[in-house]
């Protein structure tokens, strides 16, 4: 009997052949290229110098000595990664054949496998309408399969209460005490109030916001009369997409929401990776790795190339 397309072993094996091998070739087998700057331990303090990363300023020491001081770090050989997974009903949307949940599962499988192959540990927190599952950080391929199974085996829920990412982020602050890489994988369709807990989490961990989206959430095509349903509440609205003014208002609202998200990520000081349901996963991860590399060069006094400036959160 052939394996089910939703079988974790089938999915992981496919990704190992089609994605992870390509990433190995692109980064010459060095997973640290993807995680440059992660897993850092405090080594020393020194006076601030021009071009130092301001995020490394130790404000307590600076206030005490009345002179700016920065922290210096040593890269830890072992990295612990946590995936904060938003699996609320809006993540089950996809305008074509691929849903945001599938994109999330494949991203988590690839990143977790890249990490565990080198002896690092990965864990996960799963959110439906609350944080209902905590998977402690462990090593190995079986751990990746376990996380993937817990993601894929959850039934789709037609409706739920409004998503509160604030609860997921606050729970992570309590559950993950040791400095880690934390990937917040969500479409960020949520009730307000998550920006402050995200900024709080940044004080302890290295955070990456992995934003899932579908192109149809950005711009509506002219499809005539449609019934649109809110994936979270189940509320339905009858709309005329042939109306150019309506499509313009929809696109403007989407752009405002995009600007608010970018501002929230920038204010919190987190890197953002955007994953669309029509994205190539390898290309998206390599874009992110390139952005991380350029950020490191910028912190050392370099300059961003023009083609990457627009991708900054």
Image (cartoon, rainbow, N blue to C red):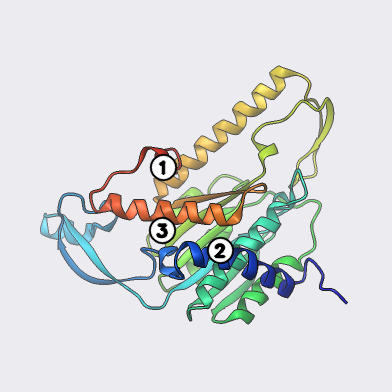
Between residue 104 and residue 168, name the one nearer to us. 104
Quote the CA–CA distance across marks 1 and 2.
Answer: 22 Å
Question: Tag 2 or tag 3, which sits nearer the N-term?
Answer: 2
Give the residue at x 60% y 63%: 19
Residue 211 position within the rendered picture, expressed as x and y whole percent measured from the top left? 57, 50
Say if residue 261 shows up in the picture. yes
Q: Secondary structure at mark 1?
A: helix
Quadrant in the rendering for residue 41: bottom left
Residue 77 position within the rendered picture, expressed as x and y whole percent measured from the top left? 37, 78
What residue is pinned by disc 3? Answer: 202
Question: Tag 3 or tag 1, which sits nearer the N-term?
Answer: 3
Q: Nearer the viewer, mark 3 or mark 2?
A: 2
What residue is pinned by disc 2? Answer: 22
Is residue 199 found left or right of 142 in the rendered image? left
Give the residue at x 74% y 72%: 10
- Location of residue 263 with respect to 281 vertically, above or below: above
Q: How many marks?
A: 3
Between residue 188 and residue 37, name the one nearer to us. 37
Res. 117 mark? none
Give the residue at x 61% y 52%: 280
Count neighbours of disc 3 (C-alpha within 10 A) and say few if under 14, some if 14 to 19, many if 20 or more.
some
- Location of residue 289 with respect to 109 vertically, above or below: above
Question: Tag 2 or tag 1, which sits nearer the N-term?
Answer: 2
């Amino acid at each position: 009997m052939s394996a089910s397309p939703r079988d974790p072993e089938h999915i992981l094996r496919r990704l190992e052949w089609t994605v992870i091998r390509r990433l190995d070739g692109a980064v010459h087998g060095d997973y640290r290229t993807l995680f440059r700057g992660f897993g850092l331990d405090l080594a020393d303090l020194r006076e601030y110098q021009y071009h130092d990363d301001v995020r490394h300023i130790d404000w307590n020491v600076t206030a005490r000595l009345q002179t700016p001081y920065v922290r210096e770090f040593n890269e830890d050989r072992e990295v612990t990664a946590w995936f904060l997974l938003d699996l609320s009903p809006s993540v089950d949307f996809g305008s074509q054949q691929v849903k945001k949940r599938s994109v999330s599962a494949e991203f988590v499988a690839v990143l977790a496998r890249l990490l565990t192959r080198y002896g690092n540990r990965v864990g996960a927190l799963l959110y439906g309408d609350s944080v209902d599952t905590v998977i402690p950080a462990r090593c190995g391929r079986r751990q990746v399969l376990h996380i993937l199974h817990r993601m894929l085996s959850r039934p789709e829920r037609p409706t739920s209460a409004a998503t509160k990412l604030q609860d997921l982020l606050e729970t992570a602050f309590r559950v993950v005490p040791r400095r880690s890489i934390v990937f917040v994988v969500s479409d960020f369709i949520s009730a307000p109030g998550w920006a402050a807990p995200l900024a709080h989490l940044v004080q302890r961990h290295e955070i990456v916001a992995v934003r899932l989206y579908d192109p149809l959430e950005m711009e509506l095509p002219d499809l005539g009369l449609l019934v649109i349903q809110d994936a979270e509440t189940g509320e339905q609205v009858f709309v005329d997409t042939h109306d150019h003014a309506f499509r313009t208002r929809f696109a403007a609202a989407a752009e405002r929401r995009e600007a608010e998200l970018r501002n929230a990520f920038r204010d919190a000081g987190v890197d953002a990776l955007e994953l669309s349901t029509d994205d190539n996963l390898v290309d998206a991860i390599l874009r992110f790795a390139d952005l991380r590399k350029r950020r490191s060069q910028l912190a050392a006094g370099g300059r961003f190339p023009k083609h990457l400036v627009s991708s900054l959160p």
